[in-house]
Amino acid sequence: MASRFRRPLSTAVKATLRRKAKARKNITYGTLVKVYRRGQGAFLSAGSRRVSMAAWSMGRVNSFLRGSRKHDLDLRRKTRKR
């Protein structure tokens, strides 16, 4: 339900996520969008006053790309099967 009311991603965020997905063989743009959206949700639930929502979300994407085992493990399992 909440996904219907979300604002669309900015063109800069889309371009960044596409560039990051293109640099990796086994991770798609769609997966990175899901990780970014989850980062936005995490910010809203327990965010920081010192970091913007966009920075928090992109940090989660970068953590996912580095192979962190803290979050988004379900998406990581899907990327390995391909």
Image (cartoon, rainbow, N blue to C red):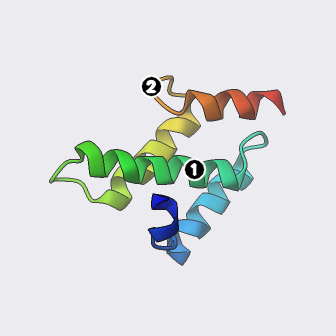
x and y percentages locating residue 12 in the rendered image: 52, 73
45 lies left or right of 11: left
In the displayed structure, 56 sits above or below 10; it is: above
41 sits left or right of 31 in the view: left
In the image, what residue occupies the spot 61% across and 30% down? 74
Looking at the rendered structure, the kind of residue marked 1 is Lys
Confirm or deny contact between disc 2 and disc 1 (CB under 8 A): no
Lower sequence index among marks 2 and 1: 1
The quarter of the image holding the C terminus is top right
Residue 7 image point, x, y percent = 45, 73
Which residue, as the protein is rendered here, is positioned at the far top? 69
Secondary structure beneath label 1: helix
Q: Nearer the viewer, mark 2 or mark 1?
A: 1
Local packing at callout 2 (Cα closer than 10 Å; few below 14, some 14-19, many 20+) is few
For badge 2, the amino acid type reads Lys
Q: Quadrant of residue 79?
A: top right
The structure residue drawn at horizontal position 38% and vertical position 50%, both measured from the top left corner, is 41
Give the residue at mark 2: 70
Taking 7 as reference, is 14 left or right? right
Seen from the viewer's position, the closer of residues 45 and 24 is 45
For residue 65, which numbered disc appears in the image? none
In this rendered view, identify the residue nearer to me: 73 or 1: 1
Q: Please give the name of the residue rendered at 72% of the width and 44% of the height, measured from the top-left corner.
A: 24
Tell me how far mark 2 sits from mark 1, CA to CA: 16 Å
The residue tagged 1 is 34
Helix, strand or loop at mark 2: loop
| Residue sitting farthest toward the bottom | 11
